[in-house]
């Protein structure tokens, strides 16, 4: 039985598929606290946005990233 990929890796793959070659995505583990997930200036689990576990949350990220890329 294969283990499911961590949510971070699942989201990373979806965003890389949505924006091929446009994003630099990295992760940093936290030894004392698990479950923090930040997309700088867009999404913060610590500020109450929760996991990116629904299509609507994913689309919100995509929209914010597209807006940010258009300004570059």
Image: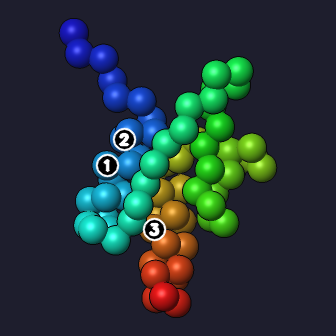
Looking at this view, name the residue that lies furthest to the bottom.
Answer: 71
Q: Position of residue 6 (x, y in %)?
A: 42, 30
Looking at this view, name the residue that lies furthest to the right.
Answer: 47
Residue hosting label 3:
62
Circle number at residue 10: 2
Look at 45% across and 48% down and name the residue there: 26
Q: CA distance from mark 1 to mark 3?
A: 13 Å
Camera-near label (1 vs 3) is: 1
Q: CA distance from mark 2 to mark 3?
A: 15 Å
Q: Quadrant of residue 15?
A: bottom left
Q: Are marks 2 and 1 in contact (CB under 8 Å)?
A: yes
Relative horizontal placement of residue 35, taking residue 62 as reference (left or right) = right
Circle number at residue 30: none
Q: CA distance from mark 2 to mark 1?
A: 5 Å
Q: Position of residue 1 (x, y in %)?
A: 22, 9
Kindly tell me whether residue 39 is visible in this rendering: yes
Relative horizontal placement of residue 31, taking residue 64 as reference (left or right) = right
Relative horizontal placement of residue 35, taking residue 15 as reference (left or right) = right
In the rendered structure, which disc, 2 or 3, sits on the residue that comes first in sequence?
Answer: 2
Residue hosting label 1:
13
Q: Secondary structure at mark 1?
A: helix
Q: Quadrant of residue 10?
A: top left
Q: Are marks 2 and 3 in contact (CB under 8 Å)?
A: no
Q: Position of residue 65 (x, y in %)?
A: 49, 72
Binning the other alpha carbons within 10 Å of mark 3 as few (below 14), some (14 to 19) or many (20 upward) gives some
Up the image or down, 5 lies above or below 14; here it is above
Look at 71% across and 21% down and name the residue there: 32
Look at 52% across and 90% down and name the residue there: 71
């Amino acid at each position: 039985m294969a283990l499911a990929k961590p949510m971070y890796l699942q989201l990373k793959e979806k965003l890389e598929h949505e924006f091929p070659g446009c994003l630099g995505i990295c992760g940093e583990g936290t030894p004392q606290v698990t479950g923090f997930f930040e997309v700088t200036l867009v999404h913060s689990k610590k500020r109450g946005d929760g996991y990116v576990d629904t299509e609507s949350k994913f689309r919100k990220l995509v929209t914010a990233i597209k807006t940010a890329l258009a300004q570059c």
